[in-house]
Amino acid sequence: MSQTNAYATHGAKDALVPFTYPLRAVGPSDVRIRVAFCGICHSDIHQARNEWGGAKYPMVPGHEIAGVVSEVGKDVKRYKVGARVGVGCFVDSCRRCENCTDGFEQFCDSGCTQTYNGVHRADKSPTYGGYSSEMVVDEHYVLRIDDALPLDAAAPLLCAGITTYSPLKHWQCGPKKRVAVVGLGGLGHVGVKIAAAMGAEVTVISHSDKKRADAARLGAKHFINTQEKDALTNAKKRFDIILNTVSEGTDWNALLGSLRRDGAMVMVGLPSTPVPVHAGSLISQRRRLTGSNIGGIAETQEMLDFCAQHGITCDIETIEPKQINDAFERVVRSDVRYRFVINAQQLAPA
Ligand code: NAP
Ligand code: ZN
Ligand code: ZN
């Protein structure tokens, strides 16, 4: 059985260290993938540090995976050896429930199988993510990456891309719509590019002035620094959609106040503390507070193709695997422009 070289954490307060595990055998509908790049999503940090509870150790994080197919099972139809592919936040689901058959595998009634920090449906063995040299994944949960997209800058689309594309599409982002993206991080910067490509007028809401110039470069027309006095009061009733990507607490009621009638604030950021919202913030202007969780397989493919068509990739800083722990610290400090991507080619298959 071949081994996989990876980086894992063994506890909530532990650093990630080199780790080796046996690669799952390639079944009839599986593809074997040589991982080329894997993004560092803030969710990797929340889970590695057990900030959401339920962490299983050892944990090999990583769900923004781009690589190349190196072997295919006998029944595989969609991919050939050499295909450029991606894997996102889940690698299986029940495939029978209403959500799965409707293309919302992320909401599978029995829970989709997370790419890491989950268990395989067949044998209950742990799932390990993309901070690895190789992976074996059922072809139905693998995405095609167009030749127009470089694998390194496309990798974060597998989570950050779909997490922003799906709610923007659902809430009808498009021309004449005013969209605010709160938090210009990994998710936020892709959200700005996608919303602008959909034709919306985009505003970035950030908690300092540091990213003002970047916001404009990424496609935002306006910028609000929440540290400035009355920043959000001045934006009252302005937005149709607020895409809230922050990983920490913020002034939820002031943000809701900046929605116009029937506007929606979509939570995609997942702070570990509850969100304190005053009912009056919703009642006034019939506002909606809602959420969104990644996206299904078909929509993820649609997003990748949309990005290829519009030339959308992520702004990345590529790191060596041994720099993962430093990168985690820098993400927490919002000190990344805008996604760390691990060069997994430096993790040789064992
Ligand atoms: P990230 O790169 O760390 O970006 C988060 C941004 O939030 C930062 O860049 C910063 O933007 C803002 N922020 C950070 N600390 C803040 C504070 N103390 N006060 C106010 N704003 C703060 O994280 P990410 O990878 O984009 O992920 C963002 C969140 O989405 C995480 O909670 C993650 O777990 C979650 N997530 C959810 C889904 C889903 O399907 N729903 C998928 C992926 C990730 P500014 O500097 O511009 O203020
Ligand atoms: Zn993620
Ligand atoms: Zn299901």
Image: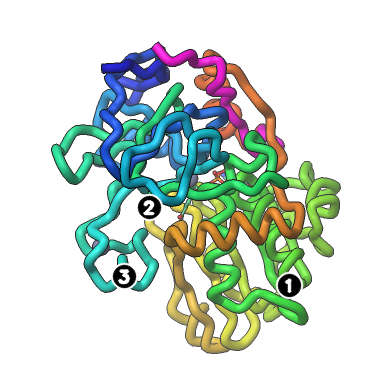
Q: Is mark 3 within 8 Å of ligand 3?
A: yes
In the image, which disc is placed on residue 140?
A: 2
Q: Which residue is mark 3?
A: 101
Residue name at image x 28 percent, y 41 percent: 28
Disc 3, disc 1: CB below 8 Å?
A: no
Which of discs 2 and 1 lies nearer the camera? The answer is 2
Give the mark nearer the N terminus: 2 vs 1: 2
| Residue 281 is covered by the magenta coloring | no
* Residue situated in front as seen by the camera: 70 or 203: 70
Residue name at image x 35 percent, y 14 percent: 19
Which quadrant would the C terminus be assigned to in this image? Answer: top left
Q: Secondary structure at mark 2?
A: helix
Q: Position of residue 234 (x, y in %)?
A: 76, 72
| Residue 344 is covered by the magenta coloring | yes
Badge 3 density bin: few <14, some 14–19, many ≥20, Cα 10 Å? few
Q: Which residue is mark 1?
A: 235
Residue name at image x 61 percent, y 75 percent: 257
